[in-house]
Amino acid sequence: MENETSSTDYRAIRIENMRALQAAGHEPFGRRFDRTGTISEIRVLGEPLIAAAAAAKAAAEAVAAQSAAAQPIADSHAAPAPVSVKAAGRLLAIRKMGKTVFADMRDGSGRIQLFVNAKNCGDAAFAAFAKLDLGDHVGCAGELFVTRTGELSVRVESWTLLSKALIQPPEKFHGLVDTEDRYRRRHVDLFSNPESRERFYKRSAILRETRRWLEGRGFMEVETPILQSHAGGATAKPFVTHYNALDRDVFLRIAPELYLKRLIVGGFDKVFEIGRDFRNEGLDRTHNPEFTVLELYQAYGDRRSMMDIIEGLLPHLCDTVIGSRKVQYGGAELDFTPPYREVSYEALVKERMGDDWFELPLAEAQKRVEAQGLPFDPAWNELLLTHEVYDKLVERTLVQPTFVTRIPHEFVPLAKTCPDDPTKADVFEFVVGGRELCPGYTEQNDPFAQREAFSAQVEEDAESEDLDFVEALECGMPPTGGLGLGMDRLTMMLTGTEVIRDVILFPMLKDSK
RNA sequence: GGGAGCGUAGCUCAGCUGGUAGAGCAAGUGACUCUUAAUCACUGGGUCCAGGGUUCGAAUCCCUGCGCUCCUACCA
């Protein structure tokens, strides 16, 4: 004999409750419900009630304190007019107090308490309310009032089942904690973990405010191909897929850069794209194979114009989304109040390794690196050794927002060089919290130099896409500034999040089974 | 890629040097008309990630696999 009820079958219990509700005339999966407003809007309607309740309580205490010294204090606050509302949401908590039930209900905007008893809603509705489970959606109608403990509540006069939940929600106090579960069942994470919900509200606000700020400065949002016949604009392994109609492999873009610059050639002088890039590479707490970037190009500008944009946009995001220009990140307080420090790559390395660093013979330099306890490859030349120093000893010390400029041209071969020094690229790397957040460029508009750089980079086949781009440059591209800002990492920075998966709604995971 | 850790009830977690599993929340029943992590009483609930092995006996020790986490490396 198999005992089929060997474990608590929450689903079966909920289905039973659903049947009971159906028998009482409740449609388990309801339809449109017209609310007075969102719960947070309804809470605003209740503010006078809370004020009046507080005043009445103060008056009562005053009366108690002065015994018979009865004053018409309470009378000076006319009782506020009753407010009838209709509210809807998901039940988060149910507290049964005999013939009274308190329930917490939440929608996308906030939480409100329901006060349910037979006196106000009738015996049948009260009895049926007992068959509701945590996670169910209901709509209810009644007057707002303030409980003895000062909580704004809806005195429920009638209620409607809007959607029965068949699955048990996570524990109310801790919420869903298991990291894997939070990513795989993000819908549960979102309705049970307020801080997760809040983080994604902020992410959305960051994207919205970025668009708004850029549009206010004459930038035009565009969309360029994600399916490309050659993944250009950066060096990374692309994802490959197959286009049946042309019987040809195509690539998911690794960057929109080349197309956006062609738009500059075409005369759209200020363009930006916020979209997804795809890179067929590793997965760790700062890398997801698909990620969101802002790329932006401005004709007649240069790297400095891009610095102006960063110094304008970031404070705007802090002000409108975070409410402070100071942000806690990785144990440090980041201050996004501009202007940001601007310092050359060379100066930073000298700061760390000594003013004579760039005059040292290689062997001397290696000794100095060794003295710092930094491992290095003896085959490296001065340039690579210096870059290792920058990477390992300098960059991570740059906690406050910093523009690192005048980077050796070898590392940024596709950028224009500095007007006074052809060995330096006229670019910046914007570093915050010890991590590179955003590169900015004075773009190469010289088709000869660009073609040369491409052929140096890609040894074998001259890629057709890149050649199209050089052809575009030959049409004449105005001097241009460009930048690329990783929106996931920016969101991490602004929300104090250390793991990229916590700012991506549905991050890449391995198959669970 | 290398190293370490974790996987136990729907959820959050205990479980010692091996003796077939516990708590809180949630659930069921009952009490309670101002609670809010409500409270109180009683009750039910387990493929201890999967598969092998050692052992009289494995959640526990060993091996393999899967997933997650952290460190490290790689990658812009």
Image: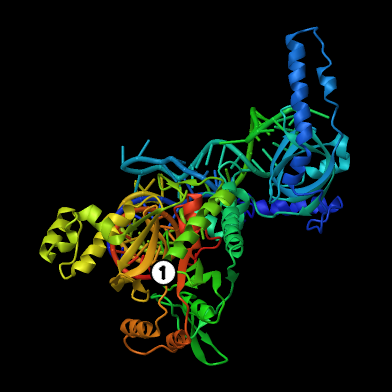
Identify which residue is drawn at 83% across, 41% down: A127
Direction from residue A125 to residue A279 in the image, left or right: left
- Residue shown at 26% from the left, 60% from the top: A346
| A3 w.r.t. A297: above or below | above
Pick whichever, A74 or A38, lies toward us: A74
Q: Where, by quadrant of the figure, is residue A443 drawn?
A: bottom left
Which residue is at a point 58% across and 68% down the rendered structure image? Answer: A219
Helix, strand or loop at label 1? It is strand
Q: A116 or A457: nearer the eye? A: A457
For this view, does A194 lie left or right of residue A399?
right
Which residue is outermost to the front?
A: A420
Residue A365 placement (x, y as % from top left): 15, 61
Q: Residues within 10 Å of mark 1 (few under 14, many from 20)?
A: many
Does A109 appear above or below A97?
below
Extreme residue in the bottom direction: A246
Q: Position of residue A312 (x, y in %)?
A: 51, 56
In the figure, A21 relative to A297: above or below?
Answer: above
Determine whether, in the image, residue A312 is placed left or right of residue A378.
right
Q: Position of residue A67 (x, y in %)?
A: 77, 7
Q: Amino acid at mark 1?
A: Tyr
Q: Quadrant of the N terminus of chain A?
A: bottom right
Q: Chain of mark 1?
A: A
- Where is mark 1, residue-wise? A441
Is residue A58 visible to us here?
A: yes
Image position, residue A218 (x, y; %): 59, 67
Residue at the far top in the pictured view:
A68
Q: Nearer the viewer, residue A81 or A478?
A: A478
